[in-house]
Image (cartoon, rainbow, N blue to C red):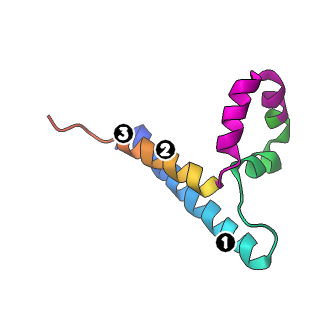
Amino acid sequence: MSPLRIIGFVLIALAVLFAAASLWYRVIGVGANLSLYEVWLKFLPASLYWIQRTVWSALWNGLYIILVMPAWAVMGVLGLICIGLGRRRIE
């Protein structure tokens, strides 16, 4: 199995965990969705603020659109892309 596929499966596992966390937050009434921005802000706020200050503003606006999406969706899509790119080609 290629390393890219392993990364893809790890990202899919993270997506499942983020979906469970979002569901749990919805059940207890804390929030609707757990965005990737919120997750990054909880674990590495200094790096998030550093990227906001140093990255070109148009690029940051594009990244921000992705970051405010639900974390499970972003991780799931990235995982599926990695799994697809890491599969063996049949010749």
- 24 vs 13, left or right, is right
Q: CA distance from mark 1 to mark 2?
A: 24 Å
- 68 vs 82, left or right, is right
- How crowded is the residue under tag 3: few (<14 C-alpha within 10 Å), some, or many (20+)? some
Q: Which residue is mark 3?
A: 86
Label ID, residue 23 = 1
The span shown in magenta is: 49-70
Q: Is residue 32 above or below residue 27?
A: above
Residue 68 % position (x, y): 71, 48
Residue 14 showing in the rendered view: no
Q: Which residue is mark 2?
A: 7
Q: Residue at x 74, y 51 (%)?
A: 39
Residue 23 % position (x, y): 66, 71
Q: Residue at x 78, y 78 (%)?
A: 28
Q: CA distance from mark 3 to mark 1?
A: 30 Å
Amino acid at pointer 1: Leu
Amino acid at pointer 3: Gly
Nearest to viewer (mark 3 / mark 1): 1
Residue 90 showing in the rendered view: yes
Q: Is residue 29 above or below residue 91?
A: below
- Asked if the residue at tag 2 contacts the one at tag 3, i.e. Cβ–Cβ closer than 8 Å, the answer is yes
Of callouts 3 and 1, the N-terminal one: 1
Amino acid at pointer 2: Ile
> Of helix, strand and loop, which one carries label 1?
helix
Nearest to viewer (mark 1 / mark 2): 1
Nearest the viewer among 21 and 7 is 21
Give the image quarter of residue 3.
Answer: top left
Main secondary structure type of the part rendered in magenta: helix
Residue 5 % position (x, y): 40, 44
